[in-house]
Image (cartoon, helix red, strand yellow):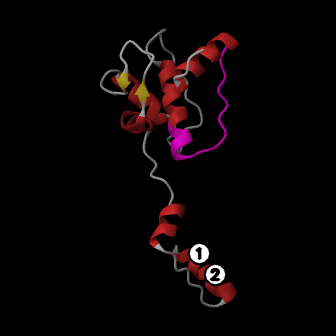
Amino acid sequence: MPPCLASAMGSMHGNAALDLSASERRVIRKPAMIPVSEWAEKYRMVTKSALPGAWRNETTPYLVGIMDAAVHPCVETVIVCKSPQIGGTEIMHNFAGRCVDVDPGDILYVFPDDKIARENALRVFDIEG
């Protein structure tokens, strides 16, 4: 227990002790906050691509900084100025995958129209249309 919490609880309720089993500590432990690029190399499989297989940052090294900036605590907005077909959508797929796995919460995924949204959903979830 953090010392500040222990002292606050001690002053309110006398001595407080929290004795958790190893299993309980494992369940409530905060997940490791790994960068998006590391998460992608460890867990992401690309199936509908010219280069199918495990995600490899060495294939597109220029995307690593953009992916990692997206989860930096001081960053609120990431603006990417890029040319077509260089991996911009894959950045978002990696980011969303990491969020779902490491820090679950709401995600709003917006695409220009239904057709593009459907195509991306099929690619991300590897299902047939």
Query: Are the residues tagged 2 and 1 within 8 Å (C-beta)?
Result: yes
> Callout 2: helix, strand or loop?
helix
Decide: few, some or many residues near mark 1? Use Cα within 10 Å; few <14, some 14-19, many ≥20.
Answer: few
| Relative side of 129 to 67, left or right | right
The residue sitting at 52% across, 73% down in the picture is: 2
Q: Is residue 11 left or right of residue 82?
A: right
Kindly state the secondary structure of the residue where label 1 is placed: helix
Which stretch did the figure color magenta? 98-112
**Residue 9 percent coordinates (x, y):** 64, 81
- Packing grade of label 2 (10 A; few <14, some 14-19, many >=20) is some
Q: Which mark is residue 9?
A: 2
Instruction: Give the quadrant of residue 62.
Output: top left
Disc 1 target residue? 5
Residue at x 45%, y 36% (from the top left corner): 36
Magenta region, main secondary structure: loop
Q: Is residue 18 magenta?
A: no
Count how many numbered circles sit on residues in the image: 2
Which residue extends farthest front?
128
Q: Looking at this rendering, what residue extends furthest in the bottom direction?
A: 14
